[in-house]
Image (tube, grey):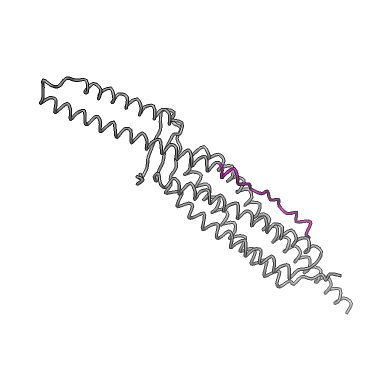
């Protein structure tokens, strides 16, 4: 049988770290999008439409990656909150019994 | 030895031009390369942290969640590869166009029109040279010297026109080759789709 376990301190630390990293990731993705845009503006040829279409698909994918990472943090946070709330309830129950 | 130009413009009456600013493309390429390095570092950091989170949280939802994280990790890595492939295409076209100039404006559809104009001009020069050749200058030696000099000038111009036409043809051919190759490379890039996660599965 699997042990249910969540190290609150460690998960809190990781959430804070991830928050910062995902914020930096957003800046990075914005820079990538701007760069692709700038390249497309300086290359006007019959291949321009293909390049622009590719850029749109990539932009959407980068947005999805960001959303996924935001949601990863949210999942950790919600589970952390659940564990904290559960352990608080158990603590109270013990206090009541005692 | 190839002559390079800071910029060249070749277009005809139709007016639809390709425009390429190689200098700015190079600048943005360097920027994009740096951003992709940051992307990769960021990807490593995020997934290392999520791996650590896996050691700090274990239950049924954690198992489902970290399974999903591992799948997404592969797809994010693939995104990096996709962007790298696109970056390589930019490098190819920068390296190819660099040899032609820094700023390029060319109307590929004007190729036939321009070559026709060169040939037309060359024909007219040939007519003039023929006229000079047909002159009887035996009775006017002084004028003959001047006229022969003029004829020599026309022959030099004709030679220049022929060389220029060949250079222009080469440029058109090179640009067509580059664009066909870029088109082929772009066709080979396939961006994998990626779906958002459903949070409720993991809480």
A12 and A63: which is toward the camera: A63
Residue B6 appears at what percent x and percent y? Answer: 36, 45
Instruction: State left or right for residue B162 relative to residue B75.
Output: left
Instruction: State left or right for residue B152 relative to residue B187.
Output: left
Residue A49 appears at what percent x and percent y? Answer: 55, 39
Instruction: State left or right for residue B22 relative to residue B160.
Output: right
Q: Residue at left 51%, top 56%? A: B33
Kindly give the residue lying farthest to the front in the view shown.
B138
Kindly give the residue lying farthest to the bottom in the view shown.
A98
Magenta-tinted stretch: B184-203
Question: Which of the image's four quarters has the C terminus of chain A?
Answer: bottom right
Q: Residue at left 55%, top 60%? A: B37
Instruction: State left or right for residue A1 relative to residue B85.
Output: right
Question: Which of the image's four quarters has the N terminus of chain A?
Answer: bottom right
Q: Residue at left 49%, top 50%? A: B91
* Image mark count: 0
B200 and A40: which is toward the camera: A40
A72 and B8: which is toward the camera: B8
Residue B136 is inside the magenta segment = no
Residue A6 appears at what percent x and percent y? Answer: 77, 70
Residue B188 is inside the magenta segment = yes
Residue B53 appears at what percent x and percent y? Answer: 71, 68
Task: Indicate whether A97 appears above or below B81.
Answer: below
A59 and B29: which is toward the camera: B29
């Amino acid at each position: 049988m699997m042990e249910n376990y969540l190290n609150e301190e460690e998960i809190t630390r990781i959430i804070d770290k991830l928050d910062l990293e995902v914020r930096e990731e957003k800046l990075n993705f914005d820079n990538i999008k701007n760069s692709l845009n700038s390249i497309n503006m300086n290359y006007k040829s019959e291949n321009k439409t293909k390049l622009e279409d590719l850029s749109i698909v990539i932009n959407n994918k980068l947005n999805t990656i960001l959303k996924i990472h935001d949601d990863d943090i949210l999942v950790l946070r919600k589970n952390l909150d659940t564990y904290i709330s559960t352990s608080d309830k158990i603590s109270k129950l013990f206090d009541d019994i005692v | 030895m190839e002559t390079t130009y800071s910029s060249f413009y070749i277009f005809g009456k139709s007016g639809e031009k390709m425009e390429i600013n190689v200098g700015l493309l190079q600048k943005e390429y360097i920027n994009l390369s740096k951003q992709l390095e940051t992307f990769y570092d960021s990807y490593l950091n995020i997934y290392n942290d999520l791996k650590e989170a896996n050691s700090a949280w274990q239950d049924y939802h954690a198992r489902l969640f970290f399974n999903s994280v591992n799948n997404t990790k592969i797809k994010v890595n693939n995104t990096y590869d996709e962007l790298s492939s696109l970056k390589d295409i930019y490098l190819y076209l920068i390296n190819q166009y660099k040899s032609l100039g820094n700023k390029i404006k060319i109307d590929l559809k004007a190729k036939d029109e321009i070559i026709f104009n060169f040939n037309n001009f060359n024909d007219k020069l040939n007519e003039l040279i023929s006229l000079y050749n047909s002159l009887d200058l035996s009775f006017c030696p002084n004028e003959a010297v001047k006229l022969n000099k003029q004829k020599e000038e026309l022959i030099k111009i004709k030679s220049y026109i022929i060389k220029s036409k060949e250079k222009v043809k080469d440029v058109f051919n090179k640009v067509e080759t580059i664009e066909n190759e870029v088109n082929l490379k772009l066709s080979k890039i396939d961006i994998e789709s990626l779906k958002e996660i459903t949070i409720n599965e993991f809480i």
